[in-house]
Image (cartoon, rainbow, N blue to C red):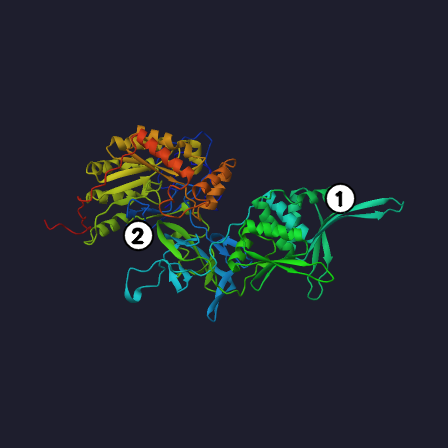
Amino acid sequence: MPLKTTAGTHGEVIKGRGAPSNIEGRFEVWNRESSDDGWFQDPGDEPQRLKTVIHIETAKSIIAHNNSPDLGFSQSINPYRGCAHGCSYCSGPDTPVLLANGRTLPISELKVGDEIYGTRLDGKYRHYTKSKVLDHWSVIKPAYRTTLEDGTTLVTSGDHRFLSDRGWKYITGTEQQGPLQRPFLTLNNKLMGTGAFAEGPVETDEYRRGYLCGVMRGDAHIGVHRFVRSNGRVGLVHQVRLALCDNQALLRAQDYLLDFDVATQEGQYLAASGNRRAMHFIRASSAWKYERVRQLIAWPSAPSSDWCKGFLAGIFDAEGSFSQTVWRLNNTDREIIDWVCRCLTRFGFPFVIEHQSFTHRKPIDTVRMTGGLREHLRFFHLTRPAITRKLNIEGQAIKSDAKLRVVSIEPLGHAMRLFDITTTTEDFIANGVVSHNCYARPSHAYLGLSPGLDFETRLSAKTNAAEKLREELSNPRYKCNLIAIGVNTDAYQPIERHYKVTRSILEVVSECHHPVTLITKSALIERDIDLLAPMAKKNLTAVTMSITTLDHSISMKLEPRTSAPARRLLAVKRLSEAGIPVNVNIAPVIPFLTDSELESIMEAAAANGAVSAFYNVVRLPWEVKPIFKEWLEKHFPLKAEHVMSRIREMRDGRENDPEFGTRMTGEGTLAELLRQRFKKAAKRYGLDKDIHDLDCSLFVPPQRHGQGSLF
């Protein structure tokens, strides 16, 4: 049954972060309970609400295991799947899928009937072929990140299969050996495909200028013609005309010209005849439009990256071709060829120039791109030409020198919303590698979920968690080791008020003296001080409170449904006063937005009784990056580019770093300065102490319900 919270202003719904159907009602409840989460609400300032659906899940197991060197624990428990806190840096995957028109689309946005690329086996090799989406759904499952040698990352469930040089392989194996063991990926297996797709261009004014320069210089007629009037005086006709067979490029050029206030007329230049396609045109004939177009297509003295992408897209639409695995671009104007080569070189594309001389006409130069399909697709995605018929890879063999060796497979340690599709070829191209349909098609009713609804509004409560925990801890083979509670989804999110799954877990571990740590950003943890304080006296528990910022205005935008910063600090104080050791996690540190607060957060945490601290720099894996960027543009448009620039500076030029050891703190000058600032502040405020290792020696296996004691 859905719940409804009534306390606090939770902030507006952010596009790209909430459910697509933003209907009213944050939670539905049987009974309403007022709660002080630290926010206040002015009369009449009613927040927009999202409907949240709660699914009761019967967990098959409750303790998750990991071997990540970046984490201080090997066991964890997450009482809930999904998270109602709505933090902008916690979201599901968004893997790009190769469409039949050569472009890409996030798998979450695919629809039944969409045409995409799959593969077919022909002799010894698989070849790309067009396929169709027959079904599309999502589930919430434990997620794994597979990283390849060239930096490609793939986030999937353990049951997903990819095509390797040794056939189809699952991400993970099974616990059984023998006939039930399934083939699974291991390090150094090589996946098949081209590798990660390039990110497309942003349609800035510079990109538009570049595109117009390419397409107009390639195919347009721009000139001034003299004529003699009836009175004998000489007149001038200024003419700009672009005629093309492909309306996609013509319409784009027309739109871009209109963006620069150059309106054009359109019409048919040649009618279709036999095998010849119809040709249409756009034109402008006033003197000022002629001059304006000349200005727009002038060669820049210092071309920007966006201009170069636009120019390559435009000149390819005008003069380029792609067929039978060959990418080429022809022109008789050596200046245009030089600019093509200059722009290709800027982005690292390999190419050769072929010169042909003729007796009775101008010589022609041909630029031919080498590097195979990997480079061809990178060109199409990086520059995004308008004419999609030229982007056809049908029939090409899946052979590539891309570095697709598997270098790591890591469990993310939590469940995520994962999308899958069924296609006519039973496979598709996911972020540049061949991916199989899911091995078992989940029902749309699984967990009460439906595609298109955001992760934060479809939650599952593991109401049998305590029962499963008691069962697993009483297993004779169980070896006591620290358990971290709430490492992925907050154990004290709003639905805990009703379901009390976290409290039921604490009752079990308290009974059997099992050490646990809890990670939260909610003041609701105060409710369980009666259980935590006695455990702390026996060195069985510690709490980590996550604090991102002390600025309420930023917090309301970044994590709209958590406790306010001041309220979290009060929780730190009350926990500390009860004898419970509290660590403060300053995360995520967002450069140019929250990094200046590092010392002030540590000072406030120490003043309220925290005994230690650590920090994490914001991470932007594929599934988070576009959402984070959109959030920045919406709330901090003047800072957005600077923030991303700082992130790239701390990630060796990339926007995300999946490597162990550096992914949490970054690298480079800015990262080192942040480390030094943290180190000095920790010493100054007494937060440089390590919380003592919790005691595993007191553990007594719990009794299963229904079993009596022999003594």
Q: Residue at x 42, y 48 (%)?
A: 92
Q: Earlier in the sequence, mark 1 or mark 2?
A: 2
Spot occupied by residue 566 in the image (x, y as percentages of width and height): 36, 30
Please name whichever residue, 162 or 218, is drawn nearer the observer in this view of the structure: 218
Nearer to us: label 1 or label 2: 1
Q: Residue at x 71, y 58 (%)?
A: 362
Q: CA distance from mark 1 to mark 2?
A: 72 Å
Q: Residue at x 23, y 52 (%)?
A: 472
Query: Is residue 89 placed above or below 596 in the rendered structure?
Result: below
Using residue 132 as the reference point, say whether residue 268 is left or right of it: right
Please name whichever residue, 569 or 4, is drawn nearer the observer in this view of the structure: 569
Residue found at the far top of this picture: 607
In the picture of the structure, the residue carrying the numbered disc 2 is 59
Looking at the picture, which amino acid does disc 1 mark? Ser
Looking at the picture, which amino acid does disc 2 mark? Ala
Label 1 with label 2: CB-CB less than 8 Å: no
Spot occupied by residue 506 in the image (x, y as percentages of width and height): 25, 42
Residue 158 is drawn in which quadrant? Answer: bottom left
| Number of other residues with Cα within 10 Å of mark 1, as a class: few under 14, some 14 to 19, many 20 or more | few
Spot occupied by residue 19 in the image (x, y as percentages of width and height): 46, 46
Using residue 580 as the reference point, say whether residue 563 is left or right of it: right
* Residue 358 visible within the image: yes
Spot occupied by residue 95 in the image (x, y as percentages of width and height): 46, 53
In the picture of the structure, the residue carrying the numbered disc 1 is 286
- Which secondary structure, mark 2? loop
Residue 686 is drawn in which quadrant? Answer: top left
Count the labels in the image. 2
